[in-house]
Amino acid sequence: MILDGKAVAQKVLDEVRAGVVRLKETRGITPGLAAVLIGEDPASKVYVGSKKRMAASLGLASPDYLFPEGLAQRELLDLVDRLNADPAVHGILVQLPLPKTLDEDEVMARIAPAKDVDGLTPTSLGRLLAGAPGMVPCTPAGCLEILDHYGAELKGAEAVVIGRSRLVGKPLAQLLLARHATVTMCHTRTRDLAFHTRRADFLCVAAGRAGVVTGDMVKPGAWVIDVGVNRRADGTLTGDVDFPSVSQRAHAVTPVPGGVGPMTIAMLMKNTLLAAERQGRTQ
Ligand code: NAP
C-alpha cells in the first residue's frame, strides 16, 4: 500500500481552513504566521514562499520579514521580541538554517513557546520529552498523522528510527514512544543497521542518504515512513529508501515526493491555528 501524504495533507488543510473560518466568525481572530528569512539561500526562499502562499490560501495573515545576510544578531533578537509581543502574530517561523554569522540556538530560544509553531525551541522540545502539551515539530507530527490516518496500531510495536536530528529523528522517536511503541534509534555509529531495521514493524527513515534502506533490510509486512529528500543527478527527488525493493516487502510505504513532504507544511498550518486558538483564549 502506498501511504498518500498528499491526500492526508489535504484533509488536514481542509480542517485548518474550516477552523480559520470558525475562529474569525466566533472570536474575530485571524491567525497570523510571521515568516522570517535572512539571506539568499534559494531553497529557503522557495520554502518560505510556499508556506506564505499556503497560509494565504487558508485565510491566515502571513507577514514576512526578509533581510540580507548582514543582519546583526541583536537586530534579529529585537525582531523576535517584537513579534513575540505582537497580538496579531500567533506563530513565528524563523527559516533555518540561518547564515553562519548568526547564533541559531539563541534566536530559536528567544521565540515565545506559545508562538513556536515549528516546535523546535528548547521549551517545546522539553515539553515533548516531558509529555506536556506544547507545539510538536511539523515533520514528525506529519509522520504520526499519516500513520493515524491509515489506522496503524503503534502500541507495543517495534519502531525503528534512523536519524537522530533535533528536527526529525529525536522528536519522532518521542512521539512513537508516547504512543507506546518500543523505540530504537539508529545513526551513523550504529554497528549493524540491518539487524535493527529487520526487526521493525514501523521503520522511519530520516538519514538524508538515498538508498540507505533496501528491501532486504525490511521486515515483511512492515510500515515504512521515508522522511528523506535527496536530489538525483537528473534533478528529480528521491527518498532515503530504495522504493522499488522496499515496496515489495513492506505492507505500506510513503513515496517521495508525495509522502511526508506535503505533511510538513500542513502541520505548520495546523500548529498556527492551534496557537491562535490558545492565545485567543488568554486575550
Ligand atoms: P540531519 O540533521 O543531517 O540528520 C541525519 C541523521 O541521520 C543523523 O542523525 C545521522 O547520524 C543519520 N544518518 C545519516 N546517514 C546515516 C546512515 N548511513 N546510517 C544511519 N544513520 C545515518 O538531517 P535531518 O534534518 O534530520 O533530515 C533528514 C532527511 O529528512 C533529509 O533528507 C531532509 O532533507 C529530510 N527532511 C524532510 C522533511 C520533509 O518535510 N519531508 C523535513 C525535514 C527533513 P549522526 O547523528 O550519527 O550523524
Image (tube, rainbow, N blue to C red):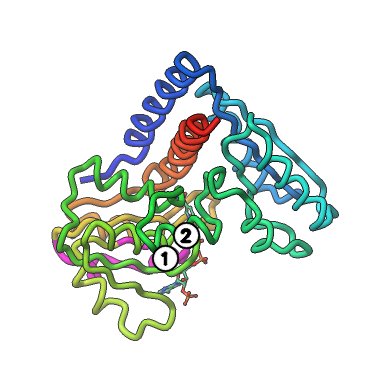
Q: Amino acid at mark 2?
A: Leu
Considering the numbered disc 2 on the image, is that residue within a helix, a strand or a loop? helix
- The response on whether ligand 1 sits within 8 Å of label 1 is no
The Cα–Cα distance between marks 1 and 2, rounded to whole angstroms, is 9 Å
Q: Which residue is mark 2?
A: 125
Residue at image location 49% in from the left, 59% down from the top? 167
Q: Earlier in the sequence, mark 1 or mark 2?
A: 2
Classify residue 86 by image quadrant.
Answer: top right
The residue sitting at the front extreme is: 282
In front of the other: label 1 or label 2? 2
Residue 242: x %, y % from top left: 34, 61
Residue 170: give its label.
Answer: 1
Q: Is residue 9 left or right of residue 157?
A: right
Please give the range of residues in magenta.
204-220
The residue sitting at the bottom extreme is: 191
Q: Amino acid at mark 1?
A: Lys
Residue 151: give its label.
Answer: none
The C terminus - image quarter: top right
Residue at image location 63% in from the left, 56% down from the top? 108
Residue at image location 60% in from the left, 32% down from the top? 52
